[in-house]
Amino acid sequence: GAGVSQSPSNKVTEKGKDVELRCDPISGHTALYWYRQRLGQGLEFLIYFQGNSAPDKSGLPSDRFSAERTGESVSTLTIQRTQQEDSAVYLCASSLPGLLAGGNEQFFGPGTRLTVL
Amino acid sequence: AQTVTQSQPEMSVQEAETVTLSCTYDTSESDYYLFWYKQPPSRQMILVIRQEAYKQQNATENRFSVNFQKAAKSFSLKISDSQLGDAAMYFCAYRTGANSKLTFGKGITLSVRP
């Protein structure tokens, strides 16, 4: 079956512009996560959705970052007034819900590489 | 706060040999999960192996196995019979059941010499 898909694959933007990054999770995966990966670093958690609600937004670095999710489907991460420090790969992952949520595998998309000039 | 530490930024192994990647973590939780992910140049994160903290037996997946030392909060990955396709970045990650996010280490770049 289809895996997690993300678009665009690469995005180059000018400082100050707004960008939208899209994630399509695996069908039936109610849990969805956004992570950020700076060059040569590990992944940093941004936000977690269960269905269309976001019980954990603790990783969003500033109010320029927001995300929404339509039902148990597509999610969009929006970065307003982009800064050069926002340059990174943004990865989305999805997983099944359940009592063993801690152990459920997160399936990752290929990421969007964002470059802010 | 939970932290995951991978202190070796790079390692190299000869093809067909064995290599061990180190990871330590810090947590006050008693129930949690540990993971090793592989990230090749394609950027796709691939789950290599998973360990439940309540299990004493070390997880094994084909050529990949872990050495889980709960008291020492250590979780190393052993790759046996290394193959050229094993070359990638490897990330150690931690997760509790209550908090579904993954906390990652900084990763280690593994190169495999032919």
Image (cartoon, rainbow, N blue to C red):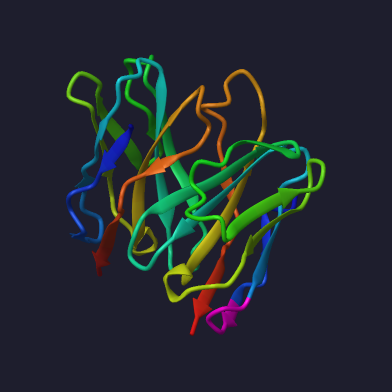
Q: Quadrant of residue B15?
A: bottom left
At 37% from the left edge and 68% from the top edge, which residue is drawn? A39
Instruction: Name the residue: 62% across, 18% down.
Output: A99
In the displayed structure, would residue B107 be above or below residue B53?
A: below
Compare residues A74 and A100 and report the one nearer the observer: A74
User: Looking at the rendering, which quadrant does residue B36 occupy?
Assistant: top left
Relative to B5, A77 lies left or right: right
Residue A116 in the image, given as x and y percentages of width and height: 50, 79
Magenta stretch?
A11-17
Q: Residue furthest right?
A: A71
Q: Position of residue A36 (x, y in %)?
A: 48, 57
Q: Does the magenta segment cover residue A15?
A: yes
Using residue A7 as the reference point, say whether residue B25 is left or right of it: left
Residue B45 image position (x, y, % from top left) = 49, 54
Could you say which is closer to the camera, residue A60 or residue A7?
Answer: A60
Can you say whether B19 is above or below A114 in the image?
above
Front residue of A56 and A16? A16
Q: Is residue B13 left or right of residue A10?
A: left
Residue B52: image quadrant is top left
Residue A103 sits inside the magenta stretch = no
Vertical arrangement, residue A115 with respect to residue B91, above or below: below
State the residue at coordinates (30%, 20%): B28
Judge from the rendering whether residue A104 lies leftward or rightward of residue B104; answer left or right.
right
Q: Residue at x 38, y 14 (%)?
A: B54
Figure disc tally: 0
- List x then y, in percent, for residue B63: 35, 42
